[in-house]
Amino acid sequence: MRVLRLTLVALAAGVALAQPARAGLFEDDEARKAILELRGKVQANEDLANKRAEQLNTLIQDQIQPLRRSVLDLNAQIDALRAEIAKLRGTNEQLARDLADTQRKLTDQAQSVDARLKPLEPQRVSLDGREFQVGPEERSQYDAAIGLVRRGDFAEAVAALNAFLKRYTASGYTDSVRFWLGNAQYGKRDYKDAIATFKAFIAGNPDHPRAAEALLALANCQIELKDNKSARRSLEDLIKAYPGTEAAQAGKERLAALK
């Protein structure tokens, strides 16, 4: 009995010891199952995330490709515009050089034309207290005729001065030409022609700066012709009309010599 009791106790103890071990086994299975389920969910989430990432990447690539092509096209257009701008800049620089060359040529031509036309333009001269304009040829002919008078070529001077009066009837040189014509005729000893020239000069220009000289020259012509009476009258008119002049002083001396 004692043995049976001991045996039952031992069996009871064995059963008691066996129950916790079986409970641990059940708990490990459930944990393993939970881990496997969790791993499955994680893997599913990873697969889903990868799939969405691929879809997003594909979508991005689909959107980026047109943009990339647009950027490439835009860069190509920019390069083309830069090349065109460089070409236009070169063209503009060439045009600027051509324009500068043209302007220089026009300036040179204008200066050349001015140089050619300048001798043909009217020139302003001052003579015997008067200012007037004359043409280049007119001035040249006058200077040449006066040069003949000064050199003593009186015959040629008379011809040149008469030709001037016929050609330039309204010239500002006319009065001066008549005065020097009278002197050239006097030098040529054409006293009658000189008297007529000096009388016309004095009558037309009594206030001319050379009127006193003309009147003295008139008297000299009359003296050369032995017309002392007319010479005396001319000298008296000179002294009376133009007192204080060198011609009047010379006239006084000449008048004294006639008495």
Image: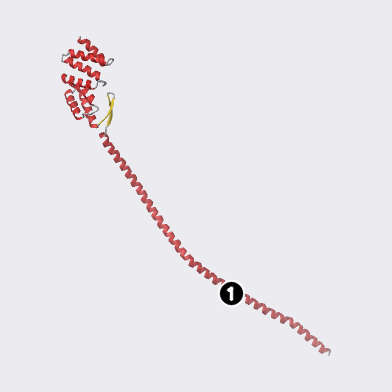
Residue pictured at 65% horizontal, 77% vertical: 34
* Image quadrant where one finds the C terminus: top left
Vertical arrangement, residue 205 with respect to residue 48, above or below: above
Residue pictured at 41% horizontal, 59% vertical: 77
**Of residues 138 and 241, which is closer to you in this image?**
241
| Amino acid type, callout 1 | Ala
Say whether residue 49 is left or right of residue 110: right
> Could you tell me residue 193's position as x and y percent?
16, 21
Q: Is residue 183 visible?
A: no
> Could you tell me residue 232's position as x and y percent?
20, 13
Q: Which residue is mark 1?
A: 44
Vertical arrangement, residue 18 with respect to residue 131, above or below: below
Vertical arrangement, residue 20 with respect to residue 221, above or below: below
> Could you tell me residue 245's position as x and y percent?
27, 16
**Of residues 72 and 224, which is closer to you in this image?**
224
Residues packed near mark 1 inside 10 Å, few (<14), some (14 to 19) or many (20 plus): few
Residue farthest bottom in this picture: 1
Residue pictured at 19% horizontal, 14% vertical: 231
Judged from the image, the secondary structure of the residue bearing numbered disc 1 is: helix
Q: Is residue 90 visible?
A: yes
Residue farthest top in this picture: 259
> Could you tell me residue 197's position as x and y percent?
19, 21
Name the image quarter holding residue 249: top left
Name the image quarter holding residue 235: top left
